[in-house]
């Protein structure tokens, strides 16, 4: 099983640290159980058993959260790889008008005057452009 060397942001322990802590608590629990069996008075060890069980449950909860975060991150990484591959396989030049592509790139088009427009792209770039309108024909 792959384990990270450093904790994820917001966590003080790595997955490997948590696994080691759970194993250590398991050994402490087994040793305490053996000691309680030898003494024959398990009731006096109840608080210690409870403390170890609570700590193990907390570590298991944290481990589950980290694993869920890693799984979500792995899914995001796979999606990003697919997008990157798709972008690499497509041309970066528009060769024909494509409404879908244009709508994804544009934020808005503002008419400034009869023959001037301002095009605002989603990334914040703005371009002002003069628009030559065809002469209108008069129909008789």
Image: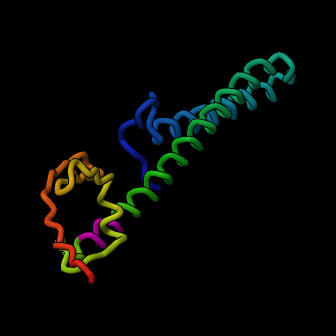
Residue at 28% x, 50% y: name it. 110
Q: Nearer the viewer, residue 23 or 95?
A: 95
Q: Is residue 6 above or below residue 95?
A: above
Residue at 34% x, 72% y: name it. 99
**Among the 4 quarters of the image, the one containing residue 22:** top right
Q: Nearer the viewer, residue 132 or 21?
A: 132
Q: Position of residue 92 (x, y in %)?
A: 18, 71
Q: Residue furthest front?
A: 140
Q: Is residue 47 above or below residue 93?
A: above
Tell me if residue 6 is in the magenta stretch: no
Q: Position of residue 97 (x, y in %)?
A: 26, 76
Q: Residue furthest bottom?
A: 140
**Among the 4 quarters of the image, the one containing residue 21:** top right
Q: Position of residue 57 (x, y in %)?
A: 68, 34
Q: What quarter of the picture does the C terminus occupy?
A: bottom left
Answer with left or right where residue 61 lies relative to residue 88. Answer: right
Residue range highlighted in magenta = 82-87
Residue at 84% x, 23% y: name it. 42
Q: Main secondary structure of the magenta part?
A: helix
């Amino acid at each position: 099983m792959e384990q990270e060397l450093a904790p994820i942001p917001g966590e003080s322990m790595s997955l490997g640290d948590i696994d080691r802590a759970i194993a250590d608590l398991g050994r402490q629990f087994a040793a305490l159980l053996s000691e309680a069996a030898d003494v024959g008075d398990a009731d006096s060890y109840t608080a210690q058993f409870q403390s170890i069980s609570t700590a193990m449950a907390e570590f298991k909860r944290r481990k589950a959260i980290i694993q869920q975060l890693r799984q979500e991150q792995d899914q995001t990484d796979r999606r990003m790889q697919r997008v990157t591959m798709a972008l690499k396989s497509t041309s970066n030049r528009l060769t024909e008008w494509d409404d879908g592509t244009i709508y994804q790139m544009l934020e808005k088009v503002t008419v400034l005057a009869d023959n001037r427009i301002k095009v605002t792209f989603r990334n914040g770039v703005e371009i002002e452009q003069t628009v030559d309108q065809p002469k209108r024909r008069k129909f008789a």
